[in-house]
Amino acid sequence: MSRLASPPPQIAPWEWAEKHRILPKDSAEPGPMRATRTPWVKPITEAIINPFVREVITVQGSQTSKTDGVLLSTIGLHAHYYGSPMMLFAPTEDAISRISIRLHRMFESVPEIWDAVDKRNKSKYLFIVNSVPIILGWGGSASQVASQPAKIVLFDELDRLKDIPGEGNAWQLTKARKSTYIDGKHIGASSPTLGLVDDYRHSETGLIHWQVADPKKIISLSWQLWQEGTKGEFMLPCPHCGQYFAPKSKLLYFPSVDSPDIVQKQARLICPHCSAEIHPNHQYSMISKGLMICPGQWVENGQIMGEIPTNPIASFHVNGLCSPWLNWSERALQLWRVVKSGNKGRIQVALNTEFGELYGEQGESPPWESIAEQRHESNYEMGEIPEPVQVLTAGVDVQRDRLVVVVMGWAVNDGQLEGYVVQYEELLGKTHYDDVWDMLQASYFDSDINGMFIREIGVDSGFNPSSLDRDRPNRNIIYDYCRRKPRAVATKGASRVMDKPFSASKVDVSQRGKQEKRGLTLWTLDTDFLKREVYARLQWDLTRAGRWHYPKNLPLQFFKELTAEQLTDTGQWVATGANHVLDAVVINYFLALKLRLAKTLHPKTIAAQPVRPTKSPPQQVRKVVHGDDFY
């Protein structure tokens, strides 16, 4: 009787779980639940008991205890102390059946709850504790949604719940179920699905956060809701510089080799602040010191400084790289395998579930007008070389009656390779004759641009103009030209899916039919990959390190041709107009990767950004794109 008269303790679900939960033998770590193994569970479940919070959204990767640590512990606490009517939804009947078994085990392991469970009830989709129902349902189950009010409504894998036919989204519909409770809660845990999102460096704290994207670019419901909330991210401290950062798949380095053993042995996490390589041995120590940080907050002496934004929606993100049960080497191997397969479906599943990140096609054509507007932010004209530029490259697209030339300058800013368009020109002339090639020689091989020579010039050999020459139809004028020019590089777009962005092969053959070791090298480009990367960079924010720059007098035709291809739903690139500039820019980007410029150039600070706390200047970084080490 005294227990019934005593007020329930004011504790968070994670505290209740540490006191009462015993995990079964088939769990990742059987025995008493320890929140210290998954420290992000603390701020997430503390938000659940915050009286000012009405909705809690957590977007997480696999093996991060979103179901057990967040949802089931929340149900356990409220069933034990508060007698709250609850509803829990999962995407399918099979998924909710498995959760029902886990919930049954949890109740059995807590005598105070098990004694209060109505044993006469035989439904696996209903638990009655102290005469209060806990209803389990699955996506599309309208009868379950409309059954009765509930104080706590929980969703597991929110993004994968189907809409209820004729009624709409289950998350929105179930809000009416808790309307009679002034302290009712809506709680959703999920790995995300589709969307296009970038990150940015906070202008005051220097920490890197996910950027709030246009909702039209986000299909994932959980990510849309996350953007509407406090936007907390679980960050780890770099063991080298001490700065906190959120681990992401793009920061996971592994070599581009065909050996899974080498991939696992050499996998490292790259710190975005100091560019140091972090060995997996540091993983568990970093996780134990991790903190949930919102935009505008920072860390001093291991403590979060700054206030959590006032918002009735508390939202959190936890990357799968934070999991204590799967090390970075294993994550790297998983990513290497799916990237190597080239299967977009497998890549999406890996990013969504393993890492808790959105998957999006980074190749949709941006409007050329918005890119052209960036000229007005520039302080240089065509033919001038901006002060940060250290190396020039040129890309040449070959047409029947002209050579389209784009010269780009390259620099490293805050660890990111940054591009500057220096020159754009069309050399007119029939390309199966030597005249126009002599113009290219005089203007770009023999001459400097403001005292700087072009390091390498890539020439597209996909179209052989010699086929138009009746006198010498079997000649390849592009190959012949590149043989004579040490700085000329012959390129060609791939007609198949490649497992890396580019590859080299010899095209000259001896009289015995063998490749000449000193013959011409043809570089085959994965144009699908390179175009996606180019288009992604075109849309980077103007304040972001690594963006591209354009001279203020660059013609509008340049921008129209730069964005003149669209990526269809079938994964094919379709030209919507003349696309010669895009091909030339793609060649420039390939040359920057081939020359390892992100690693070999000296970093320069182009635009100072205030940070708190003060961090050391950025060092050179080995950039990784889709898991391939290009440098």
Image (spheres, rainbow, N blue to C red):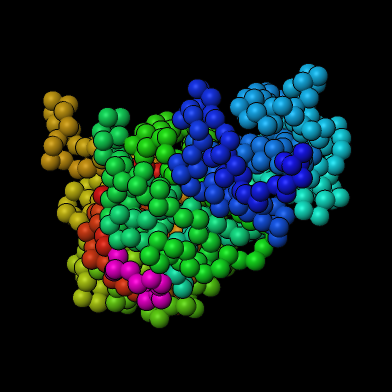
In this view of the protein, which residue sits in the foreground, 118 or 530? 118
- Residue 520 belongs to the span the image colors magenta: no
Residue at 66% x, 44% y is 188
Q: Residue 621 vs residue 13: left or right? A: left
| Residue 21 visible within the image | yes
Residue at 48% x, 68% y is 305
As drawn, the residue found furthest toward the bottom would be 379
- Point out the stretch of residues depicted in magenta: 607-618
Q: State the image coordinates of residue 340 (x, y, percent, origin top left).
A: 39, 33
Q: Residue 153 vs residue 353: left or right? A: right
| Rendered image quadrant of residue 445 | bottom left
| Residue 223 visible within the image | no
Q: State the image coordinates of residue 589 (x, y, percent, origin top left).
A: 35, 55
As drawn, the residue found furthest toward the front would be 2
In this view of the protein, which residue sits in the foreground, 256 or 223? 223
| Rendered image quadrant of residue 120 | top right
The quadrant of the image that shows the N terminus is: top right
Specify the principal SS of the magenta part: loop
Residue at 26% x, 35% y is 265
- Residue 617 belongs to the span the image colors magenta: yes
Q: Is residue 207 above or below residue 222?
A: below
Q: Residue 219 vs residue 143: left or right? A: left
Residue at 73% x, 49% y is 7
Q: Is residue 364 above or below residue 439?
A: above
Question: Tag count in the figure?
Answer: 0
In this view of the protein, which residue sits in the foreground, 561 or 129? 129
| Rendered image quadrant of residue 90 | top right
Q: State the image coordinates of residue 365 (x, y, percent, origin top left).
A: 55, 55
Q: Is residue 366 above or below residue 38?
A: below
Q: State the image coordinates of residue 266 (x, y, percent, origin top left).
A: 26, 39
